[in-house]
Amino acid sequence: STLCIHGLGYIGLPTAAMFANYDHDVVGYDTSEEVVTRLSDGEVHFDEPGLRAFVTQAIESEQLTISNEVVEAKYHIICVPTPFDRETKEAGLEYVESAGQAIEPHLRPGDTVILESTVPPGTTADVLRPILEESGLDAGEDFALAHCPETVLPGDIITELKQNARIIGGVNGVSTEAAVRLYESFVEAEIHTTANATTAEFVKLIQNTFRDANIAIANEIAKLAHDYEIDSREAISLANEHPRVNIHHPGPGVGGHCLPVDPWFLGQNSEELDLIKHAREVNDGMSGYIIDILKEELGGLEDTKIAIFGVAYKGNVGDTRESPGLKLARELQAVSPQQEIAMPDGGVEVDTSSSPSITLHDPHVNDQTLQLLSREEAVDGADAIVIATDHDEFEEIDPLFISRFMNNNLVIDSKAILDEDRWNTEGFRVSRI
Ligand code: SAJ
């Protein structure tokens, strides 16, 4: 076979289907039996518009085979996760390492290995390369080795795979060229090259770091604007009329598997994270800021009921990774007034009867562990609604209908998506970020 894709997640699966639909012979490999079984039955294990049909087309044309075995292939593309450790703020490279170990016995002279996973700078050259060279083959001489970071936006992956510019950096010029030839088969935009894998890794990380820091500025502006009693969104949009100013939107914090973690990866092998680290903390602090607003507006959180609308990490997707809505729910539970009661046996029990109760509603998320409620159930007896995600459905909510269920009338519209006048008319107090 021509290509073996390692890891069939958010990036690996669409990439495998893309190459297959562009006439390559592709084996999609995943270590999870469940993923392999479900995909073989035509079921896609996560939510991405158009992906199911795209994958089905690739499988039915027999260009794409799903397998739980690694095969010999002219190109190996690694699309495995690099899980973030919240304690150490580091990327886990165990899956990159095991992918390398799985490829090594199948590696032949003339093959090309490409790492797509987002990794700390230096990973391709210092972690992956030595593992592959245990085959006795030399990277850059006997086989090509390159980093080609993915840059697609969840929710629009198939289009962006084709239309986004790519950056490719090999461990030497020959490696870079080998990877470029492969991606040229479907990438319509420019492919930029650097004969250095570390630069390509670095570029990917600073793209997401830029966006994260820009959002941190927007969030700080929102807090400042609140103190001056002005509308931050109006101010930002007016500021952006300047040809060289482009401030992003404030909100409940930054979620997803990229923006909240990639900036930390930059600091994995360097001590220089400063402003970037601070920007991360500003964004992480937005849930605490929302809690302060709730406390102020409700006069404390004791015995309140808060409905959180939106636990996906952003609008119109079903992905909850690093979701601001869930982070807010966790923190609301933690800061709640809890009383310790001494028990007759000498132990201590925590009385949570006066804690706020939290309900969650999200029409895009399908997760049994979250106890998601319908819109009406979630607001029944609630004192406040926090809109934490800009799903299209939320714009259509009828405030009059909702008001019948609620106990109090507060709405924190962290994404500024509601028609404020309409909600005010129905007696709601709307607080935006
Ligand atoms: N957000 C704001 N304000 C904004 C824009 C976004 O608060 O003005 C929040 C969103 O609500 C969300 C988070 O930021 O919680 C991230 O959303 P996003 O749409 O900015 O990005 P992701 O994480 O879905 O995808 C990003 C993209 N990177 C850039 O735009 C630089 C995507 O192109 C990357 O491929 C992806 O990370 C990745 O895989 O690295």
Image: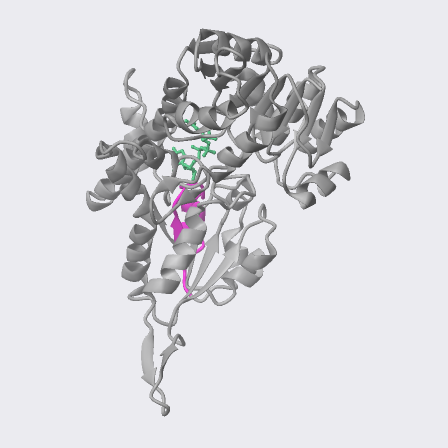
Q: For the C terminus, give its image quadrant.
A: top left
Q: Quadrant of residue 261?
A: top left
Left or right: where does residue 424 sit relative to residue 174? left
Q: At x 72% / y 38%, what residue is drawn?
A: 39
For the residue pair 83 and 413, the one nearer the viewer reads as 83
Q: Which residue is drawn at the image coordinates 38% and 78% (left, top)?
A: 351
The correct choice, above or below, for 366 with respect to 123 in the image is below
Q: Is residue 410 visible to the viewer in this orientation of the structure?
A: no
Residue 260: x percent and y percent?
Answer: 38, 39
User: Residue 55: in sight, yes or no?
Assistant: yes
Task: Tell me residue 96's x, y (percent).
Answer: 50, 33
Question: What residue lies at 53% left-to-right and 30% top-to-bottom?
Answer: 100
The outermost residue toward the left is 228
Quarter holding residue 297: bottom left
Relative to 404, say whether 127 is above or below.
Answer: above
Q: Position of residue 58 (x, y in %)?
A: 74, 25
- Magenta stretch: give its range: 408-426
Horizontal side of 79 relative to 343 (left or right) equals: right
Give the percent coordinates (x, y) of residue 271. Answer: 23, 34
Q: Quadrant of ligand 1?
A: top left
| Looking at the image, residue 291 lies above or below residue 126 | below
Residue in the foreground of this view, choosing between 11 and 414:
11
- Quarter of the image with the N terminus is top right
